[in-house]
Image: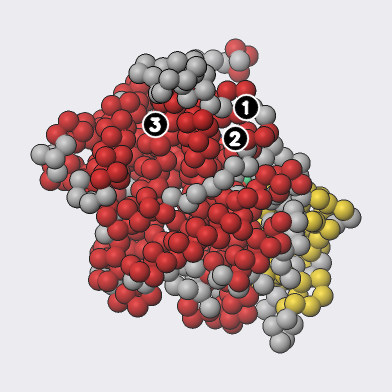
Amino acid sequence: MSQYTAPVKDMNFVLFDVFKADEYWQSNSTLAEAIDPDTAKAILEESAKVTEQAIAPFSRTADEEGVQFNEGVVTTPECYKNAFNVVAEGGWIGLAGDPEYGGMGMPKSLAAMHEEMMCSADLAFALYPGLTAGACLAIRAHASDEFKETYLPNMYAGTWAGSMCLTEAHAGTDLGLIKTKAVDNGDGSYDITGSKIFISGGEQDLTENIIHLVLAKLPDAPEGSRGISLFIVPKRHVNQDGSSGENNNVSCGSIEHKMGIHGSATCVINFDGAKGYLVGEINKGLACMFTMMNYERLLVGLQGLGAAERSYQNALTYALDRGQGKGNPRMGEGATDPIIVHPDVRRMLLNMKAMNEAGRAFTTYVSIQLDKAKYDEDADVAKIANAKGQLLTPIAKAFMTDISLEMTIAGQQVFGGHGYVREWGQEQLVRDTRITQIYEGTNGVQALDLIGRKVAMDNGVTANTLAKEVIAFAQENEQLFPKELKQLTEAVDVLSAVTVDVLKKAAVNPNELGAASVDYLHLFGYVMYGYMWAKMMVAANNVSDEQLKTSKLKTGRFYFSRLLPKIHSLKAMIESGADELYQHSVDDF
Ligand SMILES: Cc1cc2nc3c(=O)[nH]c(=O)nc-3n(C[C@H](O)[C@H](O)[C@H](O)COP(=O)(O)OP(=O)(O)OC[C@H]3O[C@@H](n4cnc5c(N)ncnc54)[C@H](O)[C@@H]3O)c2cc1C
């Protein structure tokens, strides 16, 4: 795989010039103690060093070596051992973790940038620390103090890893169907029995122990998702002194052979009367698990962004070097010009650049909402930020990963036939990013979550608050970029009108929500990226770095003229409604 250069300059611009994160950190007593701009910049530089040097150079080797399975033993690619040690010893798993248990207490807005770099460097590898950090969040939020003390320090340190055990052979999206059983032993422990499939990092050779977060049902539990409880099930028992003991009747039955993320172990994990410990309340497990799942959903969006960023970097380097045909105007006197002269190659590169930079700003915006929800001292601010974070999480997961597939394919296309063969790494990025549209709840299900739970059930209140925020920003700055900010206001109007229309139709026919959902999510995504570009253009107008300023203003204009207009076709598709989908009888398919 080609070289990776972490986009630290753009990250600093987004964090400090666009969102003035430092001002917010200083205004908040907890964050002011944890972080200042110099420390944040040093963390970004260090993260860049780790990902560029210890992880990215080996991602192709890891893909080719893959994960091996032999009689229950899972072996990850050799280069992952060193990479994992570097990540663990650097404290990166606990970057945003609770300082009381050994975490570094950094804001999500900073941690998300580290996560993007990890995912660019090697998406498959990033799953091991990423799932561990996610499991820590759920334990931190819902487990007893005793469990927090037992598990969190070792997990933040990377001595133990975490996994998320939801899926069963017959229960994927519909987790209410799970069959894994939990039987109360009456001594604070439960016997867990069942088989989970597709468990990322369910077994590996990187850590001394694996702490599984397992969804299971008690014998008398209510039917469906209201009867699910959450358990901590360590792979090896934890001894009184905190060390890892004997195996806890947890075993790996097999691993999957997959299209991509070959370095990530995707396992069948069998629990045969394994000792588990309840987290949160009985039958409230799904809600507790959502703490982890929401975190993972933003991380999956960052996986998409990471892959697309790496693909863009490769494609740009190639387009500047590969000579084919002659352009207008020409670049030099040679027999050919580099392919970057051709309009279609420029279109692909600019699509990638515009969408990636907007994606980085968008994940930062979402992360700032999560930081405010967690840390803000004003309860009202925290509440609104929480609602916005919830609303935007399915967009971060699904829009960013749908776009990632498009962008990695564009990056592959820039290489022509050389993008299809292994040598340049572009095909790996396409294969690796494909799963991001599927796991952590398919993108179709994310779209339903957005339109059904986050918009319809809320009567559009949070979406409306956000729309007002965008319009206020556009009005405040319209004299700077009148054409683009007028377009942004119109885009918000389109989104608001579509929202009202779909909700009205859904009151008569509930299928209208599902029929509109994916296009609606994309429409929402393009409007949010428009907001991000407007914010970046306004911020860039004030920076002294002329190269950065010019690049941002030109790319922003490109977004408004070539990409935002997609909302009009999405609107038309949404308006066609549910009836069109139900014209076919099953026999007509
Ligand atoms: C590589 C990999 C790693 C994974 N890692 C983990 C992990 O660490 N832990 C874990 O627990 N799971 C993991 N998964 C499982 C993953 O989260 C599920 O595959 C995913 O949630 C979809 O479930 P399913 O495969 O059963 O598909 P199904 O639920 O059967 O869905 C099939 C199709 O039907 C659609 N669909 C289903 N229900 C609805 C509905 N109500 N409305 C509209 N459309 C619907 C879906 O969108 C999809 O297109 C992993 C999977 C893979 C492949």
- Determine the residue located farthest toward the bottom in the rendered image: 241
Figure quarter occupied by ligand 1:
top right
Crowdedness near tag 2: few (<14), some (14–19) or many (≥20) residues, C-alpha within 10 Å: many
- For label 3, the SS is helix
Cβ–Cβ under 8 Å for marks 3 and 2: no
Which of the two labelled residues, at mark 1 and mark 3, occupies the earlier sequence position? 3
Say which amino acid is labelled 1: His
Q: Is residue 466 left or right of residue 165?
A: left
* The N terminus lies in quadrant: top right
Crowdedness near tag 1: few (<14), some (14–19) or many (≥20) residues, C-alpha within 10 Å: some
Cβ–Cβ under 8 Å for marks 2 and 1: yes
Point out residue 474 in the picture as x, y percentages from the top left corner.
Answer: 17, 41
* Ligand 1 within 8 angstroms of badge 3 C-beta: no
Per the model, the C-alpha gap separating discs 3 and 2 is 17 Å
Q: Nearer the viewer, residue 332 or 3?
A: 332
Per the model, the C-alpha gap separating discs 2 and 1 is 9 Å
Q: Which residue carries the number 3 mark?
A: 350
Which of the two labelled residues, at mark 2 and mark 1, occupies the earlier sequence position? 1
Point out residue 403 in the picture as x, y percentages from the top left corner.
Answer: 47, 35
Q: Which residue carries the number 1 mark?
A: 418
- Determine the residue located farthest toward the top in the rendered image: 588
Quadrant of residue 108 within the rendered picture: bottom left
Which of the two labelled residues, at mark 3 and mark 2, occupies the earlier sequence position? 3
Point out residue 158 in the picture as x, y percentages from the top left corner.
Answer: 63, 69
Say which amino acid is labelled 2: Gln
Residue at 81 percent of width and 71 percent of height: 247
* The C terminus lies in quadrant: top right
Q: Which residue carries the number 2 mark?
A: 426
